[in-house]
Image (cartoon, helix red, strand yellow):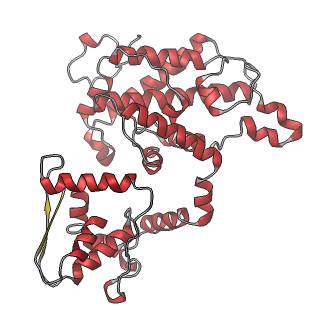
Amino acid sequence: ILAIKECCEACPLDVELTIKSDSRTMIDGLTTNLSRWEDEGFLTVADGRAIQTTVARLRERKADTYLQWVKGHSGETGNEAADRLADEGRQAELPTMINMHVTQELRLPGAKLQNMTQSLAYKIIKDKKMNTRACRKALKRRATKRNMDLAQGAAEDMNKETCAPQTIWKSFKNKDFDRKIRAFLWMSMHRGYKAGDYWSKFPDFDDWAICKECEITESMGHILTRCDAPGREKVWELASQLWRKKTGEDMEPTFGEILACGVIKKKSRGESRLYRILLSESAYLIWKLRCERVIGGKPGASDQEIENRWRWTINNRLEIDRLLTNTKWGKHTIQKSLVLQTWRNTLANEDRLPEDWTGKAGVLVGEG
């Protein structure tokens, strides 16, 4: 969007200008979505100030300005050169100073009250709160930064490309995660659960910081990937069996991979989605087993109980997927093809099932 702004500034106001871009989002934003974004004061879109400034530059022009979409990585000379310049900008050691000044007559302040809804107002207030100094300071907590570094490293290793922190935070809202999983990932990233070092601050409770099975300080990474207490090893063994049945590969996730599971890409959409589901649901089950044992005082669960609970969890996700292929759920409907891709090569007696089994009750995942 800033490239479009710079283009407008570099070209004389009375000369016709054609801007080519491979970003459909930006072209739609400056045309079909512009009226709505202006009514909302550009407060609900990412980089709203940059978009508002770009719109002002476009309106300053006296000659016609055309926006043309081009396919990315298709050999378009200008587009390829723009990608190279963008890479140079990302790798630059010093930030580029950008003029964001807009004259008062070209700036529309705030959002229109007549277009305001309770949902929109809540979103705007929440976004503004996230930009306060206190919230920014919370996001820079050492524990949060350390976990974010682990997640970014895991995403880069798996995807072979860098992943911005904003992308990982946004992935926690992925539709494949239900509310409890979203909260679990968010709290784990912030190290918000009362475990491990949290109890070291209280002299009378410092022994609560120690894992009784391993006799070392607890942490979420330890609980999910290294602890010898009943549950962890069995859960990951079951998850690995199902993943091996799907892909022929083993699953040995790190804590970083669990945090980044919403952005990790596999060979197909179906594989990526199953990976997200397996990692998040399995990790959350391990956490629940730990809490039942440590906080609830229950004895460690048997392997059979753990297997039964894990299978119920995954079969429940399968059943929810199957039901959500029905179009009666409106915007919550999941594409039938995506559900079939997700669970292909994982089902019990799959060779006896119809090609489209989404209308058939009682479909279960198979054993490895």
Q: Which residue shows up at 20% across the image and 20% down it?
A: 355
39 in relation to 361, above or below:
below
**Residue 105, image x, y percentages:** 32, 89
**Residue 239, image x, y percentages:** 46, 19
* Left or right relative to 129: residue 11: left
Q: Which of 276 and 68 is in front in this view?
A: 68
**Residue 246, image x, y percentages:** 34, 18
Q: Nearer the viewer, residue 63 or 274?
A: 63
* Left or right relative to 203: residue 31: left
Check the picture and name the quadrant holding the C terminus.
top left
**Residue 225, image x, y percentages:** 58, 24
Check the picture and name the quadrant holding the N terminus.
bottom left
Q: Which residue shows up at 71% across the image and 40% down it?
A: 194
How many labels sit on residues? 0
Q: Which of 343 and 49 is in front in this view?
A: 49
Query: In which image quadrant can residue 234 be found?
Result: top right
